Amino acid sequence: MSLDVHAYWDFDDPAGSEQRFRIAREQATSEAARAVLTTQVARALGLQGRFHQGHAELASISRDALADPEVAARAALERGRLHRNSGDPDGAEPAFESAARLAEQAGLGDLHVDALHMLALLPDDPAEQARRNRRALDVARSSADAGARRWVPSLLNNLGMTLHETGDDRAALAAFEEALAELRQRDGDPGTTRIAAWMVAWAKRLLGRDEEALQEQLALAAEHEAAGTSDPYVHDELAELYTARGDRAAAEHHRAEAERQRS
């Protein structure tokens, strides 16, 4: 099915996204397309905290539509997200496992990795999160599906955070550096690339590599200024780094700038 659901999404506006999916569903010419769009209505409802309505949307999908592998995989995936986001990880896990299995069997690489990435978010144990992230990474890297391979930078970022939580900041830095290199190689979105660069500098500060971290955060601040964007977290880090240097004036300047950008 050649239906690009990403074109309808604005994750900063789930209510608006919901309406776009409802309109597209009304205009769809096949039952399978309507069912795929219904799964996205359910996801948008979940992002608004309207979990019961989201489950009701998924329950409305017919058995005939669920015979389509993509519809079945998407329905299981969104059921899992509804369970997880409503605080029910035990209900989410079998749904994500079903979504991963269905997507893999159907050769839907993007959905397969999405389901594996969601499974990695469930455990409380960072070591198990890291294990699951590595599994998702292996699948994404080896996939012939460009959509699956696009997951690599975000999975590396997630892996870096779980490695940090296990106390292995050196391995975390390596994951963050690889994520940044992937984004730069792909000429990724500038905003996403700056976040990845921030993660690298943050990890370097944690490892005591303060001078490198300082120069990288200063470069990020200059990039944001040139682009007309802002990120208070850059100035939070600069305040930390200047404090460690003993430069109270510079530290206070960046704390004030961080607060200004948040206001």
Image: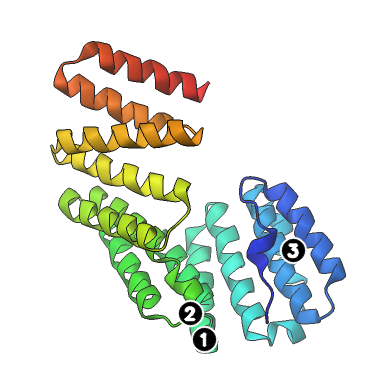
Depth check, mark 3 against mark 2: the one in front is 2
Identity of the residue drawn at 81% across and 81% down: 30
Identity of the residue drawn at 41% across and 19% down: 257
Q: Are marks 2 and 1 in contact (CB under 8 Å)?
A: yes
Of all residues, the one furthest to the left in this rendering is: 208
Identity of the residue drawn at 35% across and 27% down: 235
Identity of the residue drawn at 36% across and 57% down: 184
Assign a secondary structure to mark 3.
helix
Spatial separation of the CA atoms under disc 3 and disc 2: 31 Å
**Percent position of residue 249, x then y:** 26, 11
Say what amino acid the circle numbered 2 marks. Answer: Asp
Q: Which one is nearer the viewer's eye here, 194 or 5?
A: 194
**Percent position of residue 222, x then y:** 37, 32
**Residue 242 sits above or below residue 84 on the image:** above
Depth check, mark 1 against mark 3: the one in front is 1
Assign a secondary structure to mark 1.
loop
Which label number is shown at residue 193? none
**Percent position of residue 165, x then y:** 26, 48
**Residue occupied by mark 1:** 107
Spatial separation of the CA atoms under disc 2 and disc 1: 9 Å
Q: Residues within 10 Å of mark 2 (few under 14, many from 20)?
A: some
**Residue occupied by mark 3:** 56
Spatial separation of the CA atoms under disc 1 and disc 3: 28 Å
Q: Are marks 1 and 3 in contact (CB under 8 Å)?
A: no
Residue 139: tell me if it is visible. yes
**Residue occupied by mark 2:** 145
Total residue callouts: 3
Q: Earlier in the sequence, mark 2 or mark 1?
A: 1
Assign a secondary structure to mark 2.
loop
Say what amino acid the circle numbered 1 marks. Answer: Gly
Q: Are marks 3 and 2 in contact (CB under 8 Å)?
A: no
**Residue 123 sits above or below residue 135 on the image:** above
